[in-house]
Amino acid sequence: MKIRNGFVIREVGGKKYAVATGDSAKHFKGMLTLNDMGVTIFGLLKNNTTEEEIVDKILAEYEVDRATVEKDVNDFIAKLKEIDVLED
């Protein structure tokens, strides 16, 4: 799975947002506010990747337990699917 083409991440006033541009704006209108982990996951989803690959990359970068990362990644991806931001 991966993020639809046309999404960009921008920083405004110290906060980071994912914004749909071009054809992606037909599927999603608005902006997503992202924390640092959201930016990391969003970036990893720019290329076709699996949840397990995302979890492994986050575990290699941050000191956190696998169960917490798996839950957070699963929840974030579920939300992205719900709002139609991901391609299969």
Image (cartoon, rainbow, N blue to C red):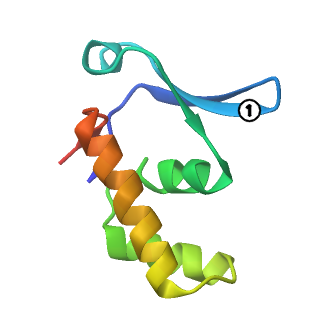
Q: Splitting the image into 4 quarters, where does residue 80 fall?
A: top left
Note whether 79 is above or below 73 in the view shown: above
Would residue 65 be seen by someone viewing this image from the given angle?
yes
Residue positioned most to the left: 88
Which residue carries the number 1 mark? 15
Q: How many marks?
A: 1
The residue under the point 32% across, 56% down is 48
Residue 45 lies left or right of residue 24; in this view the side is right
The x and y percentages for residue 73 are: 42, 64
The residue under the point 82% across, 31% down is 14
- Secondary structure, mark 1, is strand
The residue under the point 50% across, 56% down is 41
Residue situated in front as seen by the camera: 48 or 71: 71
Q: Residues within 10 Å of mark 1 (few under 14, many from 20)?
A: few
Residue situated in front as seen by the camera: 69 or 56: 69
Residue 66 lies left or right of residue 25; in this view the side is right
Note whether 64 is above or below 83 in the view shown: below
The x and y percentages for residue 39 are: 59, 48
Residue positioned most to the right: 14
Note whether 39 is above or below 56 in the view shown: above
The quarter in which the N terminus is drawn is bottom left
Callout 1, which amino acid? Answer: Lys
The x and y percentages for residue 88 are: 17, 48
Q: Splitting the image into 4 quarters, where does residue 7 fall?
A: top left
The x and y percentages for residue 52 are: 35, 76
Residue 81 lies left or right of residue 36; in this view the side is left
The residue under the point 53% across, 29% down is 8
Would residue 2 be seen by someone viewing this image from the given angle?
no
